Image: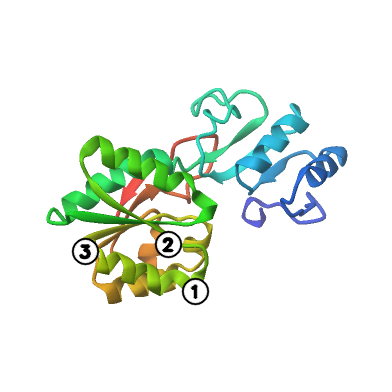
Amino acid sequence: MAELGHVYRRDFVTEPRSTDGIAVVAELVGLQVDVIVATGGGTVLSLLKRATMTVPIVMTAVSDDPVRQGLVQSLAHPGGNFTGMSLQNLELTGKRLELLKELVPGAEVVAVFWDPTDTGLWTAASAVGQARGFKLLSVEIRDAAQFATAFKTASNAGAGALLIPASGLLFSQASQIVELAALSRIPTMYELRPYVDVGGLVCYGANIAISGGVRQPTSTRY
């Protein structure tokens, strides 16, 4: 905001709230704020959708498809009071797997890491694997203490390549994940560039630096 010439408390104020349920949503709507920036997932957005049709709501890099969720009419013309950015993570899962197979053509097994904050990832990957004849290995991780074990599981199963999303648990520990991937010597495809910035091999995903209306950001390969 400062770069745009806006001074806090002179030109605008913020009302930060945690995304912990309908009470917070109702409170914000009751304060008659001018705009709500929603950083939470699908549950929070659904609550906001039911709470107001007039307060502008800006979604920050929502991972789910906002059209399928009924939040916007389309990515090009959102309509209503929702706008923001969609990463379309699940929709790009197939492309990531295709690129990974091109990168490591000899990989008979591709391990897919996922955690409970992104349960749709394995479902999407599994569907792609069945449709295209990829042999995939599901590796669920529930806490950071399981990282090393997860890589060992992939290695013991003979995984020749690995797909790692930018879900809550995994993305928050990107440096550790990348280090373990390097130690395991398994070529790894990541979802977003911050993994590559800390030493990851390759990624394919949305450019999270893009701003503006609801859009499908250009997917980028590094």
Tell me which label, 2 or 1, sits earlier in the chain.
1
- Residue appearing at x 87%, y 38% in the figure: 30
Which of these two is toward me, 3 or 112?
112
Res. 194 mark: 2
Tell me which label, 3 or 1, sits earlier in the chain.
1
For the residue labelled by badge 1, is the local secondary structure a helix, a strand or a loop?
A: helix
Residue hosting label 3: 158
Residue hosting label 1: 145
- Amino acid on which disc 2 is placed: Pro
Q: Mark 2 to mark 3: distance in Å?
A: 27 Å
Which of these two is toward me, 131 or 199?
131
Residue 37, position as x, y percentages in the image: 68, 45
In the current view of this chain or complex, which residue is farthest to the left? 106
Dot in front, 2 or 1: 1
Which of these two is toward me, 153 or 162?
153
Q: In this view, does 84 lie to the left or right of 190?
A: right
- Amino acid on which disc 3 is placed: Gly
Q: Mark 2 to mark 1: distance in Å?
A: 22 Å
Judge whether residue 199 can be spotted in this image: no
- Amino acid on which disc 1 is placed: Ala
Up-down relation of residue 51 to residue 217 (above or below): above
Up-down relation of residue 187 to residue 16 (above or below): below
